[in-house]
Structure formats: structure tokens, C-alpha cells
Image: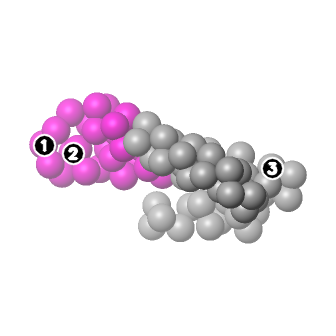
Amino acid sequence: MFALLPIFALLIAPTSLRMISIAGITTVSLALLGALGGRLGGAPVLRASLRVAVGGMLAMAVTAGIGRLLGVAVG
């Protein structure tokens, strides 16, 4: 379910706001999934949520940076 939210953002957001909308919705989705994983695993929910969200943001930033270096960045 949460994995579909970035796709909904792509379909709904205006063209000028697509990249920021997708990144924001993806981060929120990752935080929710991290919280769910923490809860199911018996770990602190906030810590698990932050770990997954920050890790996802770093991964998105690295991916965007590599794409920009290679000249294939979108946006």
C-alpha cells in the first residue's frame, strides 16, 4: 500500500512540483514503513522510522547525484 503512494504523487502532482512531491511522499512512506517494522519487530518505533526515512533520503540523494554526474538526471 505505502509503496503506491509515490506513484499516486506522480499522477496527481503538477509537472512543476513532481520531483519534490515524489521525494516528499516517498520519505513519508518510508517513515511509515519504518515505524511499522519497528512496531512489528519490537524496536522503538520513532528510532526505526527515522532510520528508514533518513536512509531512504540518503539513497535518493546519492542516486540523484550519480544521475546528475552522468547527465541522466530528471527534473
- Establish if 19 lies above or below 55: below
Tell me the element at label 3: helix
Tell me the element at label 2: helix
Question: Residue 8's image quarter?
Answer: bottom right
Q: Residue at x 60, y 52 (%)?
A: 66
| Left or right of 74 on screen, residue 42 | left
Q: Position of residue 57 (x, y in %)?
A: 51, 42
Q: Position of residue 23 (x, y in %)?
A: 62, 48
Q: Is residue 19 visible?
A: yes
Q: Which mark is residue 42?
A: 1
Residue corresponding to mark 3: 17
Q: What stretch of residues is rendered in magenta?
A: 27-53
Lower position in the chain sequence, tag 3 or tag 2: 3
Q: Position of residue 40 (x, y in %)?
A: 18, 51
Q: Main secondary structure of the magenta part?
A: helix
Camera-nearest residue between 35 and 23: 23
Three-letter amino acid code at the position of disc 2: Arg
Give the Cα distance between marks 2 and 1. Answer: 5 Å
- Do the CB atoms of the residues marked 1 and 3 lie less than 8 Å apart? no
Would you call the spot at circle 2 few (<14 residues within 10 Å), some (14-19), or many (20 or more)? some
Residue corresponding to mark 2: 39
Q: Residue at x 23, y 44 (%)?
A: 38
Lower position in the chain sequence, tag 1 or tag 3: 3
Whether 48 is among the magenta residues is yes
Three-letter amino acid code at the position of disc 3: Leu
- Do the CB atoms of the residues marked 2 and 1 lie less than 8 Å apart? yes
Q: Which mark is residue 68?
A: none
Pick the quarter of the image with the N terminus: bottom left
Three-letter amino acid code at the position of disc 1: Gly
Camera-nearest residue between 63 and 41: 63
